């Protein structure tokens, strides 16, 4: 057919049998195979379909393109549900035929049907092809800042290494949901030179369990002013189900849970070539501010991630959130070479269904 795009089939979703084609399309774009990442990603989408949006475009030769996105419900302190675009690929001989446009239109329609008002993603500042596509697709720079920190081998050096000795490069986004509304949480503990000693000794740090859910929800409610028990419960369940990819820690003082942190290992979102730690959420009871709880949690987190051979940890914070940014910079975080993007989703047109 002269109009090749007319032969595209966008009716079927991405399936397990598409794995080989997805890996091949991605490898042609990235210059390396990321099969393990896509195996995990597709398995998660099949296990939790309500939290994942995935689309396929097919033609006479098979899979012409794919798109993977995940629902965000509380990460980065956002109140509204959003979709995080994690991976998109088009077969080399199918480029220029409207495959990317068809995938993106499918994503927009899914978002509108599920009450999602915003799309989010990230890209390295020098990923020129991706930046061009994001611009053409209506994305703009998000106000949030992506920051990251190297994790020294063994983790111990995280307690003593000064912030200016760390590189300020590369990555995706740790997801930090602890935010203050009426009562701003103070994560900073004492001064940065407190890290010259073992910060994790400031509290009893150990893994979280299902029994800790009420206390975690209580702390989060005290920070955000909202009841996000369902979100916290889902994050905790993910952490406990997949301990090889997720780390959850709690901080106890006087036998009381006063802080928590949940992180996951990201093995390829946004085209990253190496595993990166993504901090899903962190919270410290405002009643226990200035006691080094946040430092203790992340010090132990660095130690645990080093054991998993993860070399970097990242997050995203609003530029006006000076308390959180001060806490992160005090721990050695610095601006990343990745940029955050966002795009609003127009509400569905009720008249289209009647046409």
Image (tube, rainbow, N blue to C red):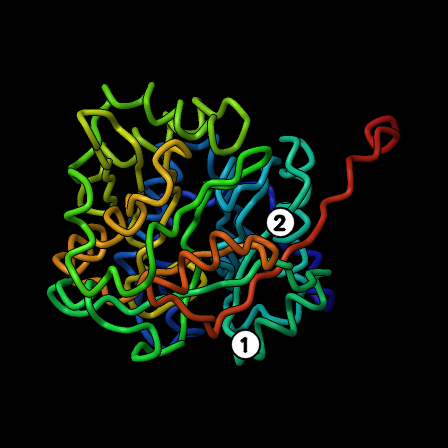
Q: Return the x and y of residue 193 as percentages of the image width and height.
A: 27, 65
Q: Quadrant of the N terminus?
A: bottom right
For residue 125, which numbered disc appears in the image? 1
Q: Would residue 17 be visible to someone looking at this image? A: yes
In the foreground, 317 or 353: 317
* Element on which disc 2 rests: strand
State the residue at coordinates (26%, 28%).
Answer: 257
State the residue at coordinates (68%, 40%).
Answer: 117
Q: Return the x and y of residue 98 as percentages of the image width and height.
A: 68, 62
Q: Residues within 10 Å of mark 2 (few under 14, many from 20)?
A: many
In the foreground, 179 or 310: 179
For residue 119, which numbered disc appears in the image? 2
Up-down relation of residue 355 to residue 273 (above or below): above
Left or right: residue 339 versus residue 277 is right
Left or right: residue 160 versus residue 178 is left
Q: Return the x and y of residue 141 as percentages of the image width and height.
A: 66, 64
State the residue at coordinates (60%, 49%).
Answer: 9
State the residue at coordinates (38%, 28%).
Answer: 234
């Amino acid at each position: 057919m002269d109009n090749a795009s007319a032969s595209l089939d966008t009716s079927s979703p991405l399936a397990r049998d598409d794995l080989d084609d997805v890996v091949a399309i991605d490898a042609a774009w990235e210059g390396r195979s990321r099969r393990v990442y896509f195996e995990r990603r597709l398995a998660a989408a099949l296990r939790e379909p309500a939290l994942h949006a995935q689309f396929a475009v097919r033609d006479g030769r098979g899979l012409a393109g794919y798109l993977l996105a995940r629902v965000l419900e509380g990460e980065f302190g956002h109140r509204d549900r959003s979709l995080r675009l994690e991976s998109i690929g088009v077969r080399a001989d199918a480029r220029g035929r409207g495959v990317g446009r068809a995938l993106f239109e499918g994503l927009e329609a899914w978002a509108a049907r599920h009450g999602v008002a915003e799309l989010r993603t990230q890209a390295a500042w020098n990923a020129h092809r991706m930046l061009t596509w994001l611009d053409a697709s209506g994305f703009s720079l998000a106000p949030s800042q992506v920051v990251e920190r190297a994790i020294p081998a063994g983790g111990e050096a995280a307690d003593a290494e000064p912030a200016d000795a760390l590189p300020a490069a590369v990555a995706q986004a740790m997801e930090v949901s602890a935010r203050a509304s009426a009562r701003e949480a103070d994560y900073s503990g004492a001064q940065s030179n407190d890290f010259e000693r073992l910060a994790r000794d400031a509290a009893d740090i150990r893994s979280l369990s299902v029994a800790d859910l009420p206390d975690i929800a209580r702390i989060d409610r005290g920070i955000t002013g909202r009841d996000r028990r369902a979100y916290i419960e889902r994050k905790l369940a993910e952490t406990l189900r997949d301990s090889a990819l997720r780390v959850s820690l709690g901080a106890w003082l006087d036998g009381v849970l006063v802080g928590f942190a949940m992180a996951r290992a990201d093995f390829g979102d946004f085209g990253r070539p190496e595993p990166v730690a993504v901090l899903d959420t962190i919270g410290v009871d405002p009643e226990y501010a200035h006691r080094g709880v946040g430092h203790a949690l992340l010090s132990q987190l660095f130690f645990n991630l080093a054991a998993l051979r993860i070399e970097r940890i990242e997050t995203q914070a609003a530029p006006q959130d000076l308390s959180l940014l001060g806490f992160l910079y005090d721990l050695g975080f610095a601006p990343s070479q990745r940029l955050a993007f966002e795009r609003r989703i127009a509400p569905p047109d009720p008249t289209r269904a009647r046409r």
